[in-house]
Image: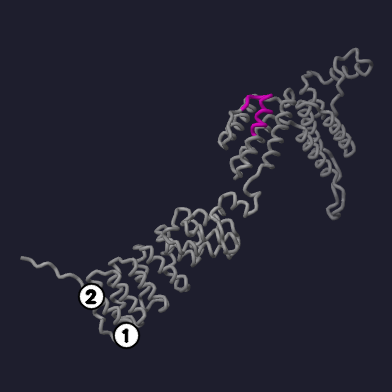
Amino acid sequence: MDYARNSWYMSNGDDDPADASEGADAADDGGEAGESTETAAPTLPEDPTEESLTEYLDEIADRLDAAETEADLDDVEALLDDAETGIEEADLPEPDEDDEDADDPRSDLEDRVAELRDGVEDARGPYGEDVVEAIEAAVGTVEDTEWTEDGRDDVAAAVASFVDAAAETVDAGPDGDEIGDLVAALDAVAEAVADADLDADDDADDIAALLEATDGLEADLDEAEEWDDLETHEQLRAQGYYDVLGHYKDYPVEWAALKEHEAQGNVDMILLALDSLGSEFMERHCLEAFERMGKRGKTEASVEEILGRAEKRDRPAIRILGKMAAAEATDTLVEYVEEDSNPQLQKAVFKALGEIGATEAVQPLANRLDPDGDTEDLVRPHAARALGLIGDTRAVKPLADALEAHPSDDVRAAAGWALRQIGTREALEAAAEYADEHSFIVSTEGEKARDALDEEPEPAATA
């Protein structure tokens, strides 16, 4: 079974392997009878043994070393296909299953074939596609990296240099210094390389030159300055964080700058500090700044940042959302209303919902007033006060019921206060009924409600 003979000569266009062999013999006699002096292809023995297969693979390895074109490598691939078939059909000794160190000729030969196939792949190319792939990788780097001002200039210079080098082989891209222009320039070169349909053999020099240019581009981009290369204080300085400082007494300077940004309402700079400065000290002060700023600190970016923390049940963040009156947080906070196992979280949530004026929370908060529920008595007054801050008249009845029958005077007093905040006649009348209550804190709210009713103007007389 002369696998290699047939595949080799068919790939070279010879009709008769025997005629080719005669030509080779004539060449050995002086080259007068044959027109080709190429070395004949290795021939797989008809009854291959471990030794003959090893010799055959050695000859293929020599042929791989001598390969100069893609066609030569194709021929080596064909010979390896024949070798693989020969190994499969060869009668080779099997290893002793009980001996882990026993030789396995078949496995060794198969490993050798795999190694030679890897050698073929390593020897192929480079191709035009390799250039396009390298350019696309550079495009990703240019687009996805946050460059400093100096780094952007370096990137522009790197791309311009690459386009000039590539222009010797393909059409250059457009000019420009902005990131979009630079990406367009690289895309144009990549498209031109793809359209050129460069051949790995005929255009090997052009491909090598383009790959050398892409290597240079990659190296230049690696050296260009990006934000991640800077120390934190350098990043802050570059983004103007310290520009607000004049003479200051507080230390560290980041804290001094933070106070000034809070005073000026520079939300973006406070967010920058919160994101950049990793210390617990500065994190705490950034959050406290937002809490003090309240609605002044509310922007889309700040709400997104603080809400992300609140979604992890962070109580300071929940307090801040309340101070911001961030209605965007309502859905998240309402989910926490029923967490009776975490009363400290509930207190923060109830107050925040009240400050937001979240009408969606009226029923869940009213349910917390039920004396038979699982909510702690220390938490129920906060639920009542939250209902008062929301001011929805749907809360009048559950608050009036709590004021009438709840066993805790603290809850009853909070319900009276909440009814006064709602301020409708119905709410005030419900609270005023307890102006003479034996509990001082309850009667105080009742008296204030009664006074509010007394101060209401008399209805106009009708004729």
User: Local crowd at mark 2 within 10 Å, few (<14), some, or many (≥20)?
Assistant: some
Q: Position of residue 403 (x, y in %)?
A: 30, 78
What residue is drawn where x is 32% and y is 72%? 418
Describe residue 424's horizontal placement relative to residue 60 as left or right.
Answer: left
Q: Please give the residue where the numbered disc 2 appears in the rendered image.
A: 429
In primary-sequence order, the first of circles 2 and 1 is: 2
Position of residue 178 relative to residue 238, above or below, is: above
Q: Position of residue 342 (x, y in %)?
A: 48, 72
Question: Was residue 259 drawn as part of the magenta stretch in this picture?
Answer: no
Position of residue 259 relative to residue 418, above or below, is: above
Q: What amino acid is labelled 2 in the image?
A: Glu
Farthest top residue in view = 32
The quadrant holding residue 452 is bottom left
Check disc 2 and report its element: helix, strand or loop: helix
Q: Which residues are magenta?
A: 159-172
Check disc 1 and report its element: helix, strand or loop: loop
What residue is drawn where x is 82% and y is 31%? 64
Position of residue 47 relative to residue 341, above or below, is: above
Answer whether residue 330 is visible to the viewer in this image: no
Task: Pick whichever, 50 or 197, lies toward us.
Answer: 197
Please name the colour scheme applied to the rendered image: one colour
Describe residue 353's horizontal placement relative to residue 100 as left or right.
Answer: left
Image quadrant in which the C terminus is located: bottom left
